[in-house]
Image: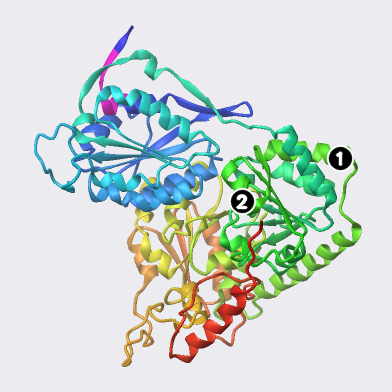
Amino acid sequence: MTTIRLTVAQALVRFLAAQYTERDGTRQRLIGAMWGIFGHGNVAGIGQALVEYADLMPYHQGRNEQAMVHAAVGYARQSGRLSAHAVTTSIGPGATNLVTGAALATVNHLPVLLLPGDVFAARPADPVLQQLEVPYAGDVSVNDTLRPVSRYFDRITRPEALIPSALQAMRVLTDPVDTGAVTLALPQDVQAEAYDWPERFFAERVWTVRRPGADAAELTEAVRAVRAARRPLIIAGGGVHHSRAETALAEFAAATGIPVASTQAGKGSLRHDHPQDVGGIGHTGTATADALARTADLVIGVGTRYTDFTTASGTLFENPAVRFLNLNIAPFDGHKLAGLPLVADARSALGELTEALGMHGHRVAGEYVAEYTEAKGRWERTVDACFAAPDPAARPTQPQVLGALDALADESDIIVNAAGSLPGDLHRLWRARSADQYHLEYGYSCMGYEIPAALGVKLAAPERSVWALVGDGTYLMLPAEIVTAVQEGVAIKLVLLQNHGYASIGGLSEAVGAERFGTAYRYPAADGTYTGAPLPVDLAANAASLGMRVLRAGNVGELRAALGEARAADVPTCVYVETETSDTVSGAPPAQAWWDVPVAATATRPSAVKARELYERHVSTRRRHL
């Protein structure tokens, strides 16, 4: 057997460079690049290997470990989970900074390979710098915090152990059910250790991403359920996008007339102007979709996890006779809400359902189509009113900012967001023009995701205009990757909305009787609350100091001009705007469905007492679907 003598790190880089995915006859590289921040735990291992094989593995220099994972996740999602990035860090705080990003990746079923340094396997000195000593377990390190947020975890304590572990890591990264964060913890001494590797380990290897079809018995039950329904509703989740099943869904909806609502992850599964698209569903959904959900007798979930935002915390589906048909590649999700499972790839099973129903000429009643079509038109007029900004000299509201971007964007633009009040406004109001235009991370709703994720998206789609939409609170979490965008010439667009605090949590705080405590970016008042003057921070100047081109927009007219200039820019560009938050100015429509955030069971302040009364009324409407 022919062998090649390399360090563990060198072997890993060469192995990763030879891995490919294939689906539907299309082949692409599995690990497209590696992000890294170097310290004593990885500089002599992975760092040296990346220099050794710079021609094989592209490298991106990050500024924050969590942000590097977010960038990798943005890249993976834009790549349809068929290509991913790796992330390497030193030991200690560099490694533990990965945890939040790893959780986000795993919650959203998006592949990322994490390669944190680890303490010495041979223990020549104990403890070493940044080592956590655990008196009851000598084999525990801080990297063990990555176990619960990883789909696969291993610590490579011997060179030869890398061979089976690396293969298992690739299996998980390419598994459409179990993908997420994959962690290979690499002790710093093992990284630099030499070994005679089988040459075959470095041969090109293709991992086929499966498209399993439906079980015949489950398909028969699904067809029977759809044919019996009088008011069916489809909920399109992120699995539609992961499967690239948008065309199959559009064909199924058009053939049957069944309306399609979407989760945050599933929005864009149909274009906004498709006759069967009724918009977002749940707490941040449209009035149209939520009204249909309340009377639906069959809910067809396609690639959705049925989170509490989607189900309005178990209060949305009010029809006593409602049943659930769950088309999902993951059996765990296929059996939720005591539903009929249809465990299969979304594109494959939608095609099979369309064909089977077409044999019977099945289509919902014309009266039902007329009902949701009229409701869809009413909601579109609501969106028009929210987007309208008749006075170009006025400060825009947040929905008017979205309206200005909506008027400018075409199907090639991509918007990235994750947290704050923007996800609700976007889910209710944004008109998605293409399958991948709407990039919302709402499985983990992680503040700080947007800027680094936009960087990853742009790397995957360099010809597209990529917009990171952030409020001031989110911006302050992770702005450092602006420097990376500037360094590498990645022309992301940043829309920075200044509203002086955590707007969404402020509103929630008020609704649950906490009186917006600690949610505003203001000086403290005499009573100890943060209700004084706004802080004199200048986030536009901060973005400029990191190298970004900044356009300040003081009113609606300036905003429109700045967005147009930013869209045409070939350098990283920020549009900074202070939004109107006055109670006298119309903003987005209120939530169309409830969300369960527990309220204090006993309190003396009137706001909390009133909030508890309302909470108990909502809780009484919750249902267990059995």
Dot 1, crowdedness within 10 Å: few (<14), some or many (≥20)?
some
Sequence-first disc among 1 and 2: 2
Question: As displayed, is residue 302 above or below residue 529?
Answer: above
Residue at x 58%, y 75% (from the top left corner): 556
Residue 559: give its label. Answer: none
Describe residue 375's horizontal placement relative to residue 429 as left or right.
right
- Residue 574, quarter of picture: bottom left
Is residue 491 among what the camera can see? no
Residue at x 87%, y 49% (from the top left corner): 363
Q: Position of residue 436 (x, y in %)?
A: 61, 48
Read off the residue under disc 2. Answer: 336
Question: As displayed, is residue 484 above or below residue 596?
Answer: above
Closer to the camera, 559 or 221?
Answer: 221
Dot 2, crowdedness within 10 Å: few (<14), some or many (≥20)?
some
Read off the residue under disc 1. Answer: 358
Q: Secondary structure at mark 1?
A: helix
Q: What is the three-letter code of the residue carrying label 2? A: Lys
Question: As displayed, is residue 162 above or below residue 378?
Answer: above
**Tags 1 and 2 touching, CB below 8 Å:** no
Closer to the camera, 408 or 611?
Answer: 611
Q: Residue furthest left?
A: 125
Residue at x 19%, y 33% (from the top left corner): 121
Describe residue 348's horizontal placement relative to residue 101 as left or right.
right
